[in-house]
DNA sequence: CCCTCTGTTTGATCAAGATCAAGCACAGCG
DNA sequence: CGCTGTGCTTGATCTTGATCAAACAGAGGG
């Protein structure tokens, strides 16, 4: 009966969904679907019933690991809020961030037992996680679900390849500008002239994302600041008066 | 009736398949499946019938474009032999190779009209290509087909992320060693101690793959040669007496 | 045979970014 | 209040890989 409520919620208006998400009963991901474009819109009522018994909403504080590199991966998650960084590390400690995941993204690695990347909360995040086994079974008999996940995979592949061009061929200045531009677009892709945003990453993380050192990131930020392309307050808050100039500084002309 | 033959071929032995592939009638991709692990094993006989009327086997000479960056992409292909490089180019000509595809791979971008990468034959290749529209329709009603393509996408994503670590954090020496090791593994993944292989890429391509210049690639190859880790004949043919040493030089300790 | 073209190597020099080293700002805390 | 720790910036110097330049090897072609 709980589930009937959820199904109704799906069709109803925003406030009610919120109530359900905050209720005692672990919220089924139908709420993610409604508010964040997650995967659960593809599931049947009976599948949702089952899933609802196992999903769990939880908060993860910034900096803590969601999944370690090479670890057994036994859950999928929808990111409800915040940013997750995916990274790889070499034996001697050199690290590279290979992807960022934002609020509506689905996290997890289908069809494999081990993850080759570590997932860590970049800031405080909220996720809705569900057991791998159940989702894997549902994938097998719900083609739309696999399709949805496939589309997410394709999106990640495109982003990874874009980033390879940045890593391999751009200058430090262009790399930093590319990063800022990417974040600005992700915060509000519709409203491209939105001028102000918070960086979800420390300078150290940005360096690991761009294949640079902390010092170089800092110097390039200062340079962009002196050139009037950005303003920075409190280290994290960035304002970009002219997004087009930032785009050009990023080499995407 | 042609198609019945194909179906039989699928179940029968190697030589017959080859005959079919060389016959006048454009070979349906069932032959790819049998010999190269392509996508057509997931299709029903009637789907194969239809597909067989539209697939076309063709050769592409090294260096020519298969799909231009940003071009309309109206075909999928199975690579039957050879290597394809996927690359991105900046407006000023800087280029980055973002992926290599080898013989059994499926090439093409589902669900999108435009490709953001250019695909070019690295050496002379043979492909079995099929119209996008037909495959897209078959994907819609054959979940196994989407699953197969999804798995290929996941493989490409893993490879892209591995390469991001190389691009962002490895030294020139490690990059070149990583490249050689990767090629060696791809030529014969089963037989990891296979010592000898041909490079499918020119020095310029290798540089674009590694985010280096031609000169640096050349110098690092010379250095690996002097250290006795590899031997090189005719510029393209590489012998590696001790794969373990190469792996260590690549930083994958 | 010479000539040209492409792909490659090698050498000399330069510069972008790494490394080493301080120092500042701010938050938490005894 | 001063102390400590963390994250960030700035400066001085060094190193890696880029750039500029030359030369070589092999293929094709007149």
Image (spheres, coloured by chain):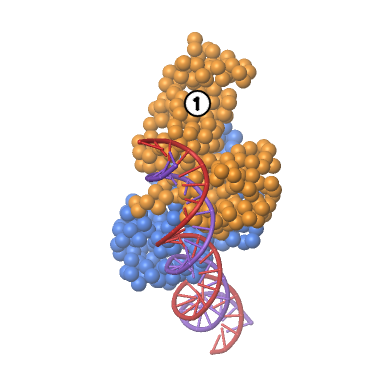
Chain colours: A blue, B orange, C purple, D red
Q: Nearer the viewer, residue B233 or B129?
A: B233
Residue A200: x, y in percent? 47, 61
Instruction: Answer yes or no: is residue A76 visible.
Output: no
Above or below for A146 versus A168: above
Mark 1: few, some, or many residues within 10 Å (few <14, many ≥20)? some
Callout 1: chain: B
Residue D10: x, y in percent? 44, 78
**What residue is drawn where x is 47% and y is 27%?**
B128
Residue D7: x, y in percent? 51, 70
Above or below for B234 versus C29: above
Q: Nearer the viewer, residue B84 or B112?
A: B84
Above or below for B229 versus A133: below
Name the quarter where the N terminus of chain A is drawn.
top right
Above or below for A138 versus A83: above
State the SS at label 1: loop
Left or right: residue A133 compared with residue B61: right
Left or right: residue B236 compared with residue B65: right
**What residue is drawn where x is 39% and y is 48%?**
B89
Residue under label 1: B142
Residue A59: x, y in percent? 55, 56
- Quadrant position of residue B148: top right
Q: Nearer the viewer, residue B55 or A33?
A: B55
**What residue is drawn where x is 45% and y is 26%?**
B58
Instruction: Answer yes or no: is residue B72 visible.
Output: yes
**What residue is drawn where x is 32% and y is 54%?**
A253
């Amino acid at each position: 009966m709980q589930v009937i409520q959820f199904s109704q919620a799906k069709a109803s208006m925003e406030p009610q969904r919120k109530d359900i998400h905050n209720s005692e009963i672990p919220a089924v991901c139908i709420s993610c679907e409604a508010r964040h474009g997650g995967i659960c819109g593809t599931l049947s009522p009976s599948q949702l019933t089952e899933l609802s018994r196992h999903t769990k909403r939880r908060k993860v504080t910034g900096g803590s690991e969601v999944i370690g590199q090479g670890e057994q991966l036994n859950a999928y998650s929808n990111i409800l809020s915040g940013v997750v960084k995916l990274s790889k590390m070499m034996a001697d400690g050199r690290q590279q961030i290979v992807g960022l995941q934002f609020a509506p993204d689905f996290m997890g690695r289908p069809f494999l037992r081990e993850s080759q990347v570590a997932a860590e909360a970049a800031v405080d995040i909220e996720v809705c996680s569900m057991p791998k086994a159940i989702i894997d079974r549902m994938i097998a008999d719900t083609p739309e679900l696999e399709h949805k996940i496939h589309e997410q995979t394709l999106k990640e592949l495109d982003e990874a390849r874009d980033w390879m061009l940045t890593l391999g061929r751009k200058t430090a200045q262009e790399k930093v500008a590319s990063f800022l531009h990417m974040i600005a677009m992700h915060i509000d892709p519709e409203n491209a002239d939105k001028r102000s945003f918070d960086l979800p990453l420390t300078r150290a993380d940005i360096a690991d994302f761009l294949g640079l050192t902390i010092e170089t990131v800092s110097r390039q930020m200062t340079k962009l600041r002196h050139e009037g392309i950005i303003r920075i307050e409190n280290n994290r808050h960035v304002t970009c008066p002219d997004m087009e100039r930032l785009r050009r500084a990023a080499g995407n002309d």
